[in-house]
Image (cartoon, rainbow, N blue to C red):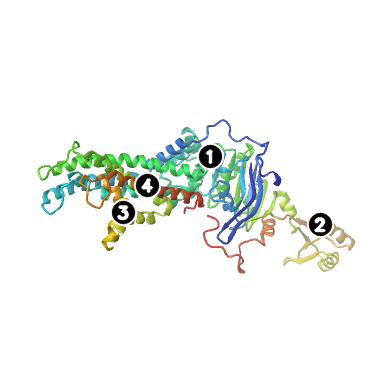
């Protein structure tokens, strides 16, 4: 027996492996991940919070800043003002992205998931694809609603933006794509770190803390790092008026997309190497 | 059919599984036995690809688990009843698993019915008792109607009714010609369910044989002898090379001679015998004997092979 390890046995005793079924595909894994994400309350809560923050906060900030805007406040950008809520909305969508993977580790579900879909690349790809689809749809929805609500709040106080103006439609579309990409960054962080708290901390660090720390650096260091910092670069896609020391909108967005792709690849590499683990 | 060949797994410097080889055949219940920390769970996790072997290989129906076209249709495993998201309702837990392997949704209702969870199908699994979680785990294992089934310590923490239900189920699955591998650290449990035993200790194979053979191979066969003339008989027995242990009630436990030989010696000496009873070695004793050198921690003797926490029995 021991000498035949490498050969496929020619006879199989007992019931044959269940015959006549179709091999499982990526589409099966995708459908499964869709069922997973839509059957948890945390999905509903984080998406509802995203809508509330982006639309509600956007309306509030639009009203306040249009009323109090005066000379010396820089260039008036009604589009990005109406999209201000995305700054917080990106966090709630990032929490959903992190949880999509870390909740499997914290509950032990990951072992059941990997037993069902042992091709780990397929599992991660299906998870990222389902989350990405949910995040893009949600992102676009909140971005467009926030834009129109924001313009309503601004009108009468400051000039409003319309879709016919250059770069306005790009910024609104870009706003939705931007937070979806931040969400995917969170999925990657969750895959790499496996713990909810660690992954959320990492996302907040990249989004807010590290860019804040940059302020302490001398200009010769600060300016180039600020310009190319992935999330800052990605954010340019929702700006209509462009500051000095920033990348062009789609170039910056492309840089963020590349950064997220590299993180996802690292997550895949680690997932492939490690034991399934979990609680 | 599961084939394990030269399987080795290291966690850091700890050797959890050490050059393990065995087959699990269809049509019977194979008990996978060993003291806690022997490497049973680790081996089972490697069979379904959750842990990566340090070396060696495992095939199911001649293929690595990861290469099975729809793994849940070939192997059903309940390794850990807690491996689910407590916030999801039971029905959807099973549905997402079914979908991942292209199993039709109606099968979910079938297996829920099979394990008696239809009434709580719409409840979140976080509120389930251990017994209900075990049943849900078994439902998940049965989803793909697989020819190979694996259960890791399935009766742990169950009430007597649940234990009997699982035993009956495992026997029934084996009777249908399926391959059934069940781990346990309880010999008594295996005595009731298993046909064949794979015994491991400290990650190494100790025995791979039928339950009867394990008992027979045990050296601990003793004969209980009761006589009014113990002193004389004891001398004769010890002369014949037996070891004799007097019991408080006056009887003697004799090792090293079979009952017929003892009877003959007694007759030759004119000794009256009240009782002459060969003691059946329980599977428990046979198991203790097999594994006594390989238990991870001997009570009182201190750790013989310290293992970092978190490695054994999840």
The answer to whether the residues at label 4 and label 3 have Cβ atoms under 8 Å apart is no
Number of the front mark, 4 or 3: 4
The location of residue A111, given as percent across then percent down, is 49, 48
Q: Chain of mark 3?
A: A
**Mark in the foreground, 1 or 3:** 3
Looking at this view, is B72 or A174 the one in front? A174
Left or right of residue B72, residue B262 in this image: right
Res A122 seen here: yes
Is circle 1 on the same chain as circle 3?
no
Distance Cα–Cα, label 3 vs label 2: 82 Å
Label 1 with label 2: CB-CB less than 8 Å? no
The numbered mark 2 sits on a residue in which chain? B
Q: Quadrant of the N terminus of chain A?
A: top right
Q: Position of residue A115 (x, y in %)?
A: 51, 44
Which numbered disc flags the more N-terminal residue, 4 or 3? 3
Chain bearing tag 1 is B
Asked if both marks, 3 and 2, belong to the same chain, the answer given is: no
Q: Residue at x 39, y 46 (%)?
A: A261
Residue B259, numbered label:
2
Q: Position of residue B34 (x, y in %)?
A: 63, 55
Q: Which mark is residue A258?
A: 4
Tag 1, which secondary structure?
helix
Compared with B280, B23 (above or below) is: above
């Amino acid at each position: 027996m021991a000498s035949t390890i490498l050969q496929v046995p020619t006879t199989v005793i007992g019931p044959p492996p269940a015959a006549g079924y179709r091999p499982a595909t990526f589409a099966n894994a995708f459908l499964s991940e869709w069922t997973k994400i839509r059957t948890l309350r945390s999905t509903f809560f984080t998406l509802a919070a995203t809508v509330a923050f982006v639309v509600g906060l956007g309306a509030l900030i639009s009203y306040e800043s249009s009323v109090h805007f005066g000379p010396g406040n820089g260039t008036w950008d009604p589009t990005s003002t109406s999209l201000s809520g995305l700054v917080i909305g990106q966090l709630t969508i990032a929490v959903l992205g992190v949880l999509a993977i870390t909740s499997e580790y914290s509950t032990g579900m990951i072992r059941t998931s990997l037993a069902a879909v042992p091709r780990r690349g397929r599992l991660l790809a299906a998870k990222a694809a389902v989350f990405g689809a949910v995040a893009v749809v949600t992102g676009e929805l909140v971005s467009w609603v926030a834009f129109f609500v924001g313009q309503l709040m601004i009108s009468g106080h400051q000039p409003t933006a319309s879709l016919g103006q250059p770069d306005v439609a790009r910024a609104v579309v870009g706003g939705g794509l931007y937070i979806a990409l931040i969400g995917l960054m969170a999925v990657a962080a969750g895959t790499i770190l496996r713990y909810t708290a660690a992954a959320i901390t990492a996302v907040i660090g990249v989004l807010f803390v590290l860019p804040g720390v940059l302020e302490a650096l001398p200009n010769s260091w600060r300016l180039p790092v600020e310009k190319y910092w992935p999330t800052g670069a990605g954010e340019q896609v929702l700006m209509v008026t462009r500051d000095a020391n920033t990348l062009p909108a789609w170039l910056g967005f492309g840089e963020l997309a590349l950064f997220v792709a590299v993180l996802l690849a690292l997550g895949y590499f680690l997932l492939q190497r490690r034991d399934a683990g979990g609680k | 059919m599961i084939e394990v060949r030269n399987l080795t797994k290291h966690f850091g410097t700890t050797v959890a599984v050490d050059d393990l080889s065995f087959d699990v055949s269809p049509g019977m219940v194979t008990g996978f036995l060993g003291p806690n920390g022997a490497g049973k769970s680790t081996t089972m996790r490697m069979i379904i690809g959750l842990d990566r072997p340090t070396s060696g290989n495992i095939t199911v129906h001649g293929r690595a688990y990861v290469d099975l076209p729809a793994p849940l249709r070939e192997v059903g495993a309940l390794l850990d009843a807690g491996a689910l998201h407590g916030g999801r309702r039971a029905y959807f837990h099973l549905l997402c698993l079914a979908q991942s392997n292209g199993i039709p949704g109606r099968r979910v209702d079938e297996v829920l019915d099979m394990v008696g969870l239809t009434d709580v199908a719409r409840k979140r699994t976080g509120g389930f008792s251990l017994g209900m979680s075990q049943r849900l785990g078994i439902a998940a294992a049965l989803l793909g109607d697989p020819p190979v089934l694996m259960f890791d310590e399935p009766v742990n923490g169950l009430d007597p009714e649940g234990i009997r239900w699982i035993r009956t189920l495992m026997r029934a699955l084996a009777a249908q010609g399926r391959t059934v591998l069940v781990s346990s650290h309880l010999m008594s449990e295996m005595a009731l369910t298993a046909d064949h035993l794979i015994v491991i200790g400290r990650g190494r194979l100790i025995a791979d044989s039928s339950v009867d053979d394990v008992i027979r191979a045990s050296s601990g066969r003793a004969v209980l002898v009761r006589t009014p003339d113990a002193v004389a008989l004891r001398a004769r027995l010890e002369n014949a090379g037996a070891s004799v242990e007097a019991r408080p009630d006056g009887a003697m436990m004799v090792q090293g001679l079979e009952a017929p030989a003892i009877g003959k010696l007694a007759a030759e000496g004119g000794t009256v015998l009240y009782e002459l009873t060969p003691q059946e070695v329980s599977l428990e004793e046979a198991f203790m004997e097999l594994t006594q050198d390989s238990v991870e921690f001997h009570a009182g003797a201190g750790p013989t092979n310290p293992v970092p926490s978190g490695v054994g029995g999840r």
